[in-house]
Image (spheres, rainbow, N blue to C red):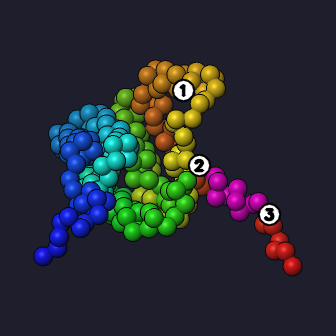
């Protein structure tokens, strides 16, 4: 038998299940499940909001785990499975119920492309997250892709458009979000921002202004925010293609 006393504390921590970060993950999972139920009941705005709530909770679980030093292999796997439900199944089913139902095979195929790309994106992240530059995501992050899809539904629903009226735009947006997740385009991760570092007063003012802007019209501002983020990677990629490469030194 293996002597438990000889195990390293880190090994024991990795095999442990911690309550606090996994509570946030469970909350994100519930929000994704709730979005699916609401979409099936035809309450599309509630479903879209639930996807955004899942995104917030998903962003908190990892930060809480790092702050409390309760990271574990179980938590990482649980988080990935929760992401598949909240940012893969829920948005694709929501979009299908809202806009694709009357399109037959074209509709469910477009929804499946998004769902499959989410699974591939998460699998790739789990296998190479230790080898890539932490400043960037390889491919569009699944929460951002889900926010793009849910935000579009939220805005269109708020303006009184039905999914049938904008279904071809919805197909283009859904496929774009899905393929962006499995692309090799780099998207800034914001992980190198140091929250403990002192900042000028203008930064606090701009942050407050940002929250005021979101509160003024959440659907439109959030959708434009994530649309801009999803395009930013391609803009950076095109800029890199145009930038002349430095010739090697002889």
User: Along the polypeptide, which appears first: circle 3 or circle 1?
Assistant: 1
State how far apart marks 1 and 2 are (Cα): 20 Å
In percent of width and height, residue 136 lies at 54, 55
The magenta segment: 235-244
Q: List the residue tagged with mark 3.
A: 244
- Picture residue at 51% right of the left edge, 64% below the top: 132
Q: Quadrant of residue 44?
A: top left
Which mark identifies residue 232?
2
Badge 3 element = loop
In percent of width and height, residue 73 lies at 28, 60
State how far apart marks 2 and 3 are (Cα): 20 Å
User: Along the polypeptide, which appears first: circle 2 or circle 3?
Assistant: 2
Quadrant position of the N terminus in the picture:
bottom left
Left or right of residue 149: residue 74: left
Which mark identifies residue 207?
1
The answer to whether residue 91 shows anywhere in this view is: no
- Compare residues 126 and 165 and report the one nearer the observer: 126
Rendered position, 192 above or below 249 = above
């Amino acid at each position: 038998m293996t002597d438990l006393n000889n195990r390293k504390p880190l090994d024991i921590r990795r095999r442990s299940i911690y309550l606090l970060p996994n509570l946030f993950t469970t909350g994100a999972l519930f929000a994704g499940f709730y979005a699916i139920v609401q979409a099936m009941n035809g309450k599309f705005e509630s479903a879209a909001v639930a996807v955004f709530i899942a995104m917030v909770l998903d962003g908190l679980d990892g930060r809480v785990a790092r702050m409390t030093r309760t990271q574990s292999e179980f938590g990482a796997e649980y988080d990935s499975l929760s992401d598949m439900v909240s940012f893969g199944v829920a948005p694709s089913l929501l979009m299908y119920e809202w806009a694709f139902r009357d399109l037959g095979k074209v509709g469910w195929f477009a929804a499946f492309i998004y769902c499959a790309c989410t699974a591939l994106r998460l699998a790739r992240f789990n296998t190479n997250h230790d080898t890539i530059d932490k400043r960037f995501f390889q491919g569009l992050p699944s929460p951002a892709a889900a926010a793009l899809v849910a935000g579009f539904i939220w805005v269109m629903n708020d303006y009184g458009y039905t999914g049938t009226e904008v279904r071809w735009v919805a197909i283009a947006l859904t496929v774009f979000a899905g393929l962006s997740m499995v692309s090799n385009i780099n998207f800034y991760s914001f992980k190198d921002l140091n929250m403990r570092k002192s900042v000028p007063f203008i930064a606090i003012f701009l942050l407050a202004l940002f929250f005021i802007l979101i509160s003024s019209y959440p659907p439109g501002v959030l959708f434009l925010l994530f649309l801009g983020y999803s395009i930013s990677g391609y803009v950076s990629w095109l800029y890199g293609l145009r930038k002349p490469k430095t010739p090697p030194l002889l």
